[in-house]
Amino acid sequence: MSERLADQPLQSLRGVGPKLAQKLADYGVHGVEDLLFHLPLRYQDRTRVTPIAALQAGVDAVVEAEVRAADIVFGRRRSLVARVQDGSGTLTLRFFHFSAAQKNNLRTGTRLRCYGNVRRGSSGLEMYHPEYRQLEEGETVNEERLTPIYPTTTGISQGQWRNLCSQALALLARAAPQDLLPPQHSHGYSLVQALHYLHNPPPDVPLGQLQEGRHPAQLRLALEELVAHNLALLRLRQQQLSVEAPALPAREREYRQLLGALPFTPTGAQQRVISEISHDLARQQPMLRLLQGDVGSGKTLVAACAALQAISNGFQVAVMAPTEILAEQHRQNFGSWLAALGIEPVLLTGKTRAAARRDILAALACGETGLLVGTHALFQADVEFHRLGLVIVDEQHRFGVHQRLSLTEKARGRSGRPHQLVMTATPIPRTLSMVAYADLDCSVIDELPPGRQPVTTALIDSARRNQVIERVASACADGRQAYWVCTLVEESDVLQAQAAESTAAELAEALPDLRIGLIHGRLKAAEKEAVMRDFKAGEISLLVATTVIEVGVDVPNASLMVIENPERLGLAQLHQLRGRVGRGQAASHCVLLYQTPLSQHGKERLAAMRESNDGFYIAEKDLALRGPGEVLGTRQTGDMSFRIADLSVHEDLLDEARRVGAELSRDTQRESALVRRWTGDRQRFASV
């Protein structure tokens, strides 16, 4: 966009005072340029007037009629009711929110042009809160284009949006922006043509194509946005790679020592990925690698091998996990595997006591501690490393890009930028990895360890809860163990804990012969550890838990998972929970105990769980059903939200966007202009 238009404030437009400007800014519209990219959600056809006699209930329509009466009616709700006629019939207009001036303006004989949804009421056909305008004597109004309906917020009407966007379009015509896309990729529209068309489409537009987001004008804008996003991520990658990292060559003797201490042999896929990471660590460019692997594929061992390579070269390693349970699990696993090499991981969380914390930070700052495992507590300013060489972030989608990068800053100026290994057990669909993780190389562990059992998933109505309890009793009587997971709509530790506590009490009453454990987010770390230790040891038969057990819990003897209200969780989270079973030799089962009635959307999601154990299939279905913001989580996507592009609709543009990005990256001036146009001042792509 030209600088003049990009810099023009909203208050330069007619009708925009300080209050409206503030409302618009709160909604994310800061300047005239933002209005141009605030595209309609849908369109209404107001180009044809319908006689009142031809109106149908449930249909939006335009009517031109004369007011015959207007009165305030007092019923269950006070309302302003106007009766209008057009010669073919009578229609009632009803307003529940109105002013005295509005009533006074609806005088008998006033001609109106109204638009609204027709419904059946006590007095015949009615329109509730139609949009309308008064017509002068002899005036006829014919809309020549479809009427746009914009996304909005409280206090900004559709009329205001249309007025503001039409003013922005008028300015656009006088200050045409540079077309930054190569002509062969413009889908037949310049930027100006595409914006004009989408704000004011002609009545003969293929409406279905427009509503689906597949009109060439939409494709042109979506492609440009995806190109800008891709270029911005690549710029981030270049910034990261421009700083030198410590070269950490492979240490074969230590690696063989680690493998020799393991009670199992790594899979071929694990060995391949370990080799890829080892090669990256040996270079003086910072490693930026995403490690994907389905539940139980053995990512933690790969991370331990990477940590060993860094520590053997005299550098420190930070391992960050989103929950205390997962951090503790990592500490135990790393500790058991690396003990033979004299490496003892140290755990730091928000609940670490002050005295212990002081000792941990002192040992870290002088280099005495080689491996620190922790939660968000690792971000805190007083956490200082002596020689940080590698950062491992587990379950990356729980953290933002800023958080990942800020952790790497703790080594700046001392030993170069540390290498980064980002792990996720939530397989990222190719679509998302191209968009959200374009700044990272990608490794995939596409092989499960031998002996892993597929999990059979059943959907059972909660009305049959007693049968499920009997099934739990049967499984535990056979010497197996089970999980019972409680979920709630509200994301509240207090309410989650209450739900889990009441469920545990109910199950204890129904199953008096079983020892039942309880774990939730409000327990102290030591209490959680004690419960998990007893469950692993087989002393607890049934573990009632909230979703805190989603990741990192490995109990091979557990073969049954019951998830209450699965319709409230995302597919990826359900897949993670299901992955807690099927880790031993016994046939394993997951029961999704749902509440009726299930929405169509809910049925599709739960059917996907029943159909497949493949995390990548589940991830693709999750993306299609929920979109990228839900799949990746707001922390990750808050800075990658798109104005025009929709990954579920425009996935086929991603390869083209990459090709165009590669072409434009050779023209730094054009590249910068494109990134600035679509990302503005957002710091998502800047070095933290």
Image (spheres, rainbow, N blue to C red):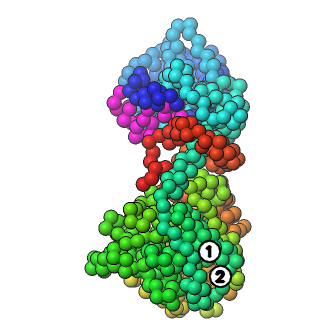
Q: Is residue 13 visible?
A: yes
Mark 1 crowd level (few <14, some 14–19, many ≥20, 10 Å Cα): many
Q: Which residues are magenta?
A: 16-38
Mark 2 crowd level (few <14, some 14–19, many ≥20, 10 Å Cα): some
Q: Quadrant of residue 126?
A: top right
Helix, strand or loop at disc 1?
A: helix
Q: 338 or 298, which is in the foreground?
A: 338
- Say left or right for 238 vs 57: left
Q: Which mark is residue 274?
A: 1
Counting from the top left corner in percent of width and height, residue 580 is at: 59, 77
Counting from the top left corner in percent of width and height, residue 430 is at: 66, 57
Q: 7 or 611, which is in the foreground?
A: 7
Counting from the top left corner in percent of width and height, residue 538 is at: 54, 91
Question: What amino acid type is highlighted by mark number 1?
Answer: Ile
Q: Is residue 395 magenta?
A: no
Residue plotted at (45% across, 57% down):
402
Depicted 69 relative to depicted 287: above or below: above
Q: Is residue 35 magenta?
A: yes
Q: Nearer the viewer, mark 1 or mark 2?
A: 1
Question: What amino acid type is highlighted by mark number 2?
Answer: Pro
| Label 1 with label 2: CB-CB less than 8 Å | yes
